[in-house]
Amino acid sequence: MQLKDQSLLRQQAYIDGQWVDADGAATIAVTNPATGEQLGTVPNMGADETRRAIEAASKAWSAWKKLTAQARAAILRKWYELIVENADDLALLMTTEQGKPLAEAKGEVTSGAGFIEWFAEEAKRVAGDTLQSPWQDKRIIVTKEPIGVCAAITPWNFPIAMITRKAGPALAAGCPMVLKPAEATPFCALALAVLAERAGVPPGVFSVVTGAPKEIGAEMCANPVVRKLSFTGSTAVGALLMQQCAPTIKKLSLELGGNAPFIVFDDADLDAAVEGAIASKYRNAGQTCVCANRLYVQDGVYDAFAEKFTAAVNKLKVGNGVEQGVTQGPLIDEKAVRKVEQHVADALAKGGRLLTGGHRHALGHSFFEPTVIADATSDMVVADEETFGPLAPLFRFKTDDEAVALANASEFGLASYFYSRDIGRVWRIAEGLESGMVGVNTGLISTEVAPFGGVKQSGLGREGSKYGIEDYLVVKYICLGLG
Ligand code: ADP
């Protein structure tokens, strides 16, 4: 991989401002999912290195929180600028270790940087309150303070944005952060650390520990110095981390699984709905927690939608993300491919009708054909479980109430989408859907400006927007006697 600035590719972890190997020098390999080629290694660290990073964060905390918000914002602003300046290299690094097409990777670098810029600005707007006192001789003041040392565990599907949406608000609020990135995509995280260092983020304020998820996670959860954990990943791991954090009563932000419904009503602009469904379903090869997982199409437009949608899916170009014009890269690994295969086989065994795709792609490795299955039904695995791959099952429904009931028949509640042009219906359905986010007449909703997060088993807390920084603050009540 030829970067313009080769120093962005680091194969060591970053703890307390130092580039370090694991105790014992163990490493784990990082591979390119499009070719199977090994790109390099990162240290395989565990509890001891994590504890050192937490101790360093604790030491760095008092100076970092005492800086004025403006001073922290200036450093974050510099970090943002460096990410944008190095966008081409970061995008190439991302496509190479994660697989998404270069254009998508570039988009993520820009939007990921946006979280740092946004929270650099929000840092200056953290404000408390003075409340009406019930006493003549006392005043009530409410301040907001940084919660303390934060830990973060991030997934591989957005190797940059999932980090910046946590580190941005944490650092802005005055909290240091220790990060464990996903094993598959550590190079993006380490490149972010290189740029943080160059931006002037002090040692210990942002550390990256690579390696064994269980050991690092267990230390982050058990260590009483850590006051907050922010996690994005599967619901099963989120539940485990919540349990592990219980003894030390940590504050939690959990952004977990989704199973997004995408509803097309009979008054929808079908071309727009097709465009939205393609963007929502096949972005990142279907590997996002807000990807449409269940497409519900009203009876009257079902066949027309299925036809237009399938035609659009057939135009997608599968290939190595670094190649020009590719719109769908490989899945992250073999396990991911097997899950899509199982969902396809289950749907076809239960009466699903294959409209296109359905198989591993001729390119081999972890490439999979963009797939559409009609006549999907509620007894299929795809109705309950996130596929996290390029499979679109089309369910048929008749009434609005039925659509809402089907959409809500899930333990998840992250994103949902629907297409309609009737304002009354739009309002009713948006209110009726049990999800943290609703896209109306659009398949793309993510931005640093809006609160991202779920309800039910999709998680706790919000990332991005003015709400995002609150997750890293605690309220302090000061009762001031005047005597
Ligand atoms: P995915 O299936 O998307 O990889 P995971 O929840 O397994 O979702 O992974 C998300 C993140 O959680 C990754 O950084 C992974 O290393 C980490 N992780 C997985 N298992 C554990 C665990 N037991 N403790 C802490 N972190 C974990």
Image (cartoon, rainbow, N blue to C red):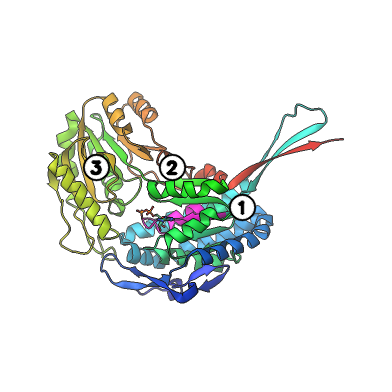
Mark 1–mark 2 distance (CA, rounded to whole Å): 22 Å
Position of 151 relative to 126 (above/below): below
Q: Residue at x 60, y 62 (%)?
A: 55
Is residue 468 at all visible to an observer of this figure?
yes
Under circle 3, the secondary element is: helix
Position of 372 relative to 70 (above/below): above
**Dot 1 amino acid type:** Gly
Q: Earlier in the sequence, mark 3 or mark 2?
A: 3
Is residue 328 at all visible to an observer of this figure?
no
**Dot 3 amino acid type:** Val
Under circle 2, the secondary element is: strand
Q: Nearer the viewer, residue 118 or 38?
A: 38
Under circle 1, the secondary element is: loop
Left or right side of 471 for 411: left
Span of residues in magenta: 150-166
**Dot 2 amino acid type:** Gly
Mark 3–mark 2 distance (CA, rounded to whole Å): 21 Å
Q: Quadrant of the N terminus?
A: bottom left
Instruction: State if disc 3 and disc 1 touch (CB < 8 Å).
Output: no
Name the residue beneath numbered marker 1. Answer: 148
